[in-house]
Amino acid sequence: MSDLSSLHDVLPGGFPGEQPGRRRRAGRQQRKRRKQRRRRTTTVVLVSLLIAGAGVYGAYLAIAPIVERLTAPKDYAGPGTGKVEVVIPDGASGRTIAQALADAGVTKTPAAFIDVIAEDERSTSIQPGTYAMKKQMSAAGALDILVDPENQIVRRVTIPEGTRLADALSVIAKKLDLKEPDLRKAAKSGDIGLPKAAKGNLEGFLYPATYDFGPDVTAESALRDMVKRGQQTYDELGIPDKELRRVVIEASLLEAEAGTEKYMGKVARVIENRIKSNTALQFDSTVSYATGKFNVTTSDADRSNPSPYNTYYHKGLPAGPISNPGEAALKAALNPTPGKWMYFVTTNPSTGETKFANDFAQHQVYVKEFQAWLRENPGN
């Protein structure tokens, strides 16, 4: 028996004298330690992978916008949608225009428009102003709009030659959607660039022409532009500052009395000759201005009005312009046609036919012709 017991003690898996239960416990502990080592290794690997993945994702988030910008198209396609107004300032460069379009959401990038205008010579014809455009347009489509003046948002007003200030302000208010009280206030504000010759009165110095304004026009800016246009004309004609008031006053008389441009030079000479001879001008147009009327003829009561504008009552030129004269009248006032005429009569107001006389007797002949026209045209 003792031999069998000794044999059992040396079987594989044990050591001499070791108990079987103790060996089993030692095996389980070894296996547990091996599993723990495997779990730790797996955890370390997973954590490392997570850290590496997070770094890659973070890098992706950082560079994705850059990649997108580099690879995305810089221009929109199509005609665009909606409405937007874009202001092109005076003297704007191509880059300035490109930036304005991009800022307004018309084009996708300034570069898109710059690329287009670099290859299209029409871009040199873009005029300053406010344009009706769409958002998200192609740069080429935006250029097509800007080179067509018809796409400008403008408010146009035309002041005819010889228009009185009060009537001109009414036209301006209507055409530019402004208020007449604001225009009258601006006319007297002293902030519209009136020359000294105007003596603070806009009458005569609101230059008659056609003007285009943007939607942001104000009473002050409209009148300032019209006065500025007049000053440019005075400079171009070479009117000396000391002569400006006289020239404008005489030109305003020519607008009212000459009827048509072809007679302006002769009427200007009559004015000069009568003033030099200390003879009253006796112009019905000045009486009508003084009384606020527009009659071809005047009454004895009208002519007795002591207004400083009444050239029957006072000798010399009226106190100021009686209308706003244009370039032709200004030229005639500067350079009257040579002659000795002292009188003139518009014998046919329908056609504007005017006859000139050196003496009173001939003048009376023409007066009778005018009176005959009045009888043939009652109500005029």
Image: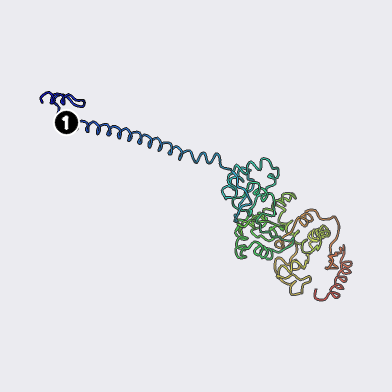
Q: What is the total number of numbered labels drawn onto the structure image?
A: 1
Residue at 64 percent across and 61 percent down: it is: 176
Which residue has dot 1 on it?
A: 20
Compared with 305, 274 (above or below) is above
In this view, the residue in front, 252 or 81, is: 81
Q: Quadrant of residue 49?
A: top left
Q: Quadrant of the N terminus?
A: top left
Q: Is residue 378 left or right of residue 319?
A: right
Q: Residue furthest left?
A: 2
Q: Residue 167's x, y, as percent?
A: 69, 65
Q: Quadrant of residue 33?
A: top left
- Tell me the crowding category of disc 1: few under 14, some 14 to 19, or many 20 or more residues within 10 angstroms, Cα based: few
Residue at 86 percent across and 57 percent down: it is: 339
In this view, the residue in front, 319 or 110, is: 110
Q: Is residue 354 left or right of residue 293?
A: right
Q: Which amino acid lies under the numbered mark 1 shown in the image of this protein?
A: Pro
Compared with 47, 106 (above or below) is below
Q: Is residue 362 left or right of residue 234?
A: right
Image colouring: rainbow
Q: Residue 146's x, y, as percent?
A: 66, 50
Q: Quadrant of the C terminus?
A: bottom right
In this view, the residue in front, 195 or 105, is: 105
Q: Residue 82's x, y, as percent?
A: 59, 56
Compared with 371, 161 (above or below) is above
For the residue labelled by badge 1, is the local secondary structure a helix, a strand or a loop?
helix
Q: Residue 225's x, y, as percent?
A: 66, 54
